[in-house]
Amino acid sequence: MTAVRSPFLRTVIALDAAVCGLGGAVFAFDAGLLEGPLGLSPSLMQPVGGFLLVYAGLLAWLATRPALPRAGVWALVAFNLIWAAESVALVALGFAQPTTLGLAAILGQAAGAAVVADLQWLALRRHRREAVAA
């Protein structure tokens, strides 16, 4: 397994950890307050928030590693793309009927997850090019 040593990638992962941790805390602990403005039920937001808190912890730990396993980073890319697709599907398939603000929040975080996946993928490609050139 090839290790990826990339300060840029660790920074992307650290920022993802911060955003996931903040979003997770808000969903886990303020779901009742957000129900009206977002049109999303606490029974949806609280488990998602709890998951995001755990995921943020994992990301924060990974961001402190000097080298990251390439397969692990590919797993993060895949996870972020799946998260983005499932977020859109949640609304498109009618599993949630958010308000306009809720829809903007869902689509915004889906776009954010896709951007993070893209940045991680770009870091992997850059690392591979540098390894081949060396």
Image (tube, rainbow, N blue to C red):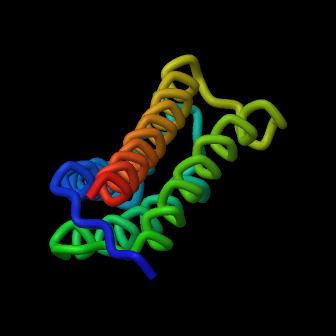
For residue 62, which quarter of the picture? bottom left
Residue 86 at x, y percent in the picture: 68, 46
**Is any atom of residue 115 visible in this view?**
yes
For residue 89, which quarter of the picture? top right
Residue at the image position 16 percent from the left and 74 percent from the top: 66
**Residue placed farthest to the front in the image?**
134
**Is any atom of residue 25 visible in this view?**
no
Q: Is residue 42 above or below residue 4?
A: above
Count of numbered marks = 0
Residue 32 at x, y percent in the picture: 44, 49
Q: Is residue 106 above or below residue 65?
A: above
Quadrant (top left, top right, bottom left, bottom right) of the C terminus = bottom left
Residue 125 at x, y percent in the picture: 42, 48
Q: Is residue 55 above or below residue 30?
A: below
Residue at the image position 59 percent from the left and 47 percent from the top: 81
Q: Is residue 56 above or below residue 54?
A: above
